[in-house]
Image: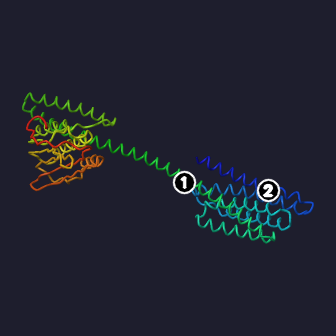
């Protein structure tokens, strides 16, 4: 698009230059009546050709400056274009006064010359300043043409055609620059979007890896310690504990592969059952109370399952808990609320870990909330609330799960 726009502008500048030179050609036919035509007409055409070349060069640099690709063009080129443009218009006015060029030829020459002058400057100056400067130049040139032509028609024609040429090229150049700047901003936005996607994927990978391996490593450490104690007592149960460690390690490998592929999801019922098993194996009296999790949408179940997993990891890693209660309930407004509460809290900072931050990110994705607070008596409570996607049925009465699973 940028190449097309630049080439179109250069071709248009070239066509206007050739158009202005072709308009001046009839002046050569008057050399018999006005011998000065052999000098003024070729000189006007040569100056117009130089103006077109300088306009193309300045417009290219001005466009780069407008797109913030380079610094502003040098003063030599800017002043050179203004000086050559003034020379073209002066030579045309002199030719008109000498009778070499007709009024309509002068009017069209003014239009071409003012267009070539206004196009590049519209990219270098603010719009208002460009309008005022162009209007001043058009009025000045028109007054000169009107005085040399000794009539109102040349003045009016020069004003009109000069305004048309300035406005057409000014808005054309400025509009082309604006479109290219928007396209460049769009391209930059796509680059930023791609980088954000990569960063988001890194965050997802780190968060999922933390959530997946956190609990499993805690369980492996717990069971390994138990196996060591049993082995020292020469108890045969040590072999069973090590077999369990081996199984958890293999499951962790599969879960890490799922995290890498982005397919890792969590099942709420499975995580509740796993939390019961792991915490009770660690000597924590764990109980799950609440409604049937199957009434929740799949996405909400997955998010709450991660909350259960991370909460279980915190209970195992921090403090010396003796009891843990997990409650799942459906509020009258249709929101699902999961609460994990345990005692034996140590002095860890509340809500500052990576796990808690990762849970907040997961819940924010489903318009949910997460609160973590320390209560009196060394009690730590983690509460996650997720709005339902559809209106649920009337909540069933709570039932306590006392062994082997969750209701």
The C terminus lies in quadrant: top left
Residue nearer the viewer, 74 or 231: 74
Tag on residue 141?
none
Q: Is residue 237 above or below residue 45?
A: above
Q: Is residue 404 visible?
A: yes
Q: Is residue 77 visible?
A: no
Residue farthest to the right, as pictured? 32
Residue for point 22% across, 48% down: 385
Kindly state the secondary structure of the residue where label 2 is placed: helix
Residue nearer the viewer, 97 or 13: 97
Residue indicated by mark 2: 23
Q: Residues within 10 Å of mark 1 (few under 14, many from 20)?
A: some
Residue indicated by mark 1: 181
Where residue 210 appears, x then y in whole percent? 26, 42
Disc 2 versus disc 1: distance between alpha carbons?
35 Å
Q: Is residue 196 above or below residue 238?
A: below
- Is 94 on the left or on the right of 235, as rendered? right
Where residue 401 appears, x then y in whole percent? 10, 39
């Amino acid at each position: 698009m940028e190449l097309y726009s630049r080439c179109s502008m250069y071709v248009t500048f070239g066509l206007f230059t050739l158009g202005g030179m072709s308009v001046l050609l009839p002046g050569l036919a008057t050399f018999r009546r006005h011998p000065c035509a052999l000098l003024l007409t070729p000189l006007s055409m040569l100056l117009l050709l130089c103006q077109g070349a300088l306009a193309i060069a300045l417009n290219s640099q001005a466009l780069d400056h407008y797109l913030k690709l380079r610094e502003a063009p040098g003063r030599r080129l800017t002043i050179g274009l203004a000086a050559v443009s003034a020379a073209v218009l002066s030579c045309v006015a002199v030719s008109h006064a000498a009778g070499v060029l007709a009024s309509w030829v002068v009017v069209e020459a003014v239009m071409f010359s003012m267009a070539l002058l206004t196009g590049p400057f519209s990219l270098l100056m603010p719009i208002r300043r460009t309008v005022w400067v162009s209007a001043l130049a058009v009025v000045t040139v028109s007054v000169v043409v009107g005085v040399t032509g000794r009539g109102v028609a040349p003045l009016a024609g020069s004003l009109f055609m000069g305004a048309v040429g300035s406005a057409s090229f000014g808005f054309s150049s400025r509009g082309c620059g604006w479109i290219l700047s928007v396209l460049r901003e769009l391209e930059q936005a796509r680059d930023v979007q791609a980088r954000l996607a990569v960063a988001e994927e890194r965050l997802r990978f780190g968060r999922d890896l933390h959530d997946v391996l956190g609990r499993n490593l805690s369980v492996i450490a717990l069971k390994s310690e138990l196996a060591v104690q049993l082995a020292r007592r020469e108890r045969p149960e040590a072999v069973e504990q090590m077999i369990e460690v081996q199984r958890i390690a293999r499951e962790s490998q599969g879960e890490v592969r799922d995290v890498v592929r982005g397919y890792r999801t969590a099942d709420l019922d499975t995580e509740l059952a796993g939390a019961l098993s792991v915490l009770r194996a660690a000597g924590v009296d764990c109980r799950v109370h609440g409604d049937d999790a199957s009434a929740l949408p799949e996405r909400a179940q997955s998010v709450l399952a991660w909350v259960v997993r991370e909460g279980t990891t915190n209970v195992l890693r921090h403090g010396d808990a003796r009891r843990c209660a997990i409650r799942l309930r459906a509020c009258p407004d249709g929101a699902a609320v999961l609460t994990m509460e345990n005692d034996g809290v140590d002095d860890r900072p509340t809500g500052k870990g990576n796990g808690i931050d990762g849970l907040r990110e997961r819940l924010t994705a489903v318009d949910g909330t997460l609160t973590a607070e320390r209560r009196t008596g060394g009690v730590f409570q983690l509460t996650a609330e997720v709005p339902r996607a559809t209106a649920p049925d009337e909540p069933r009465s709570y039932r306590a799960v006392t062994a082997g699973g969750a209701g």
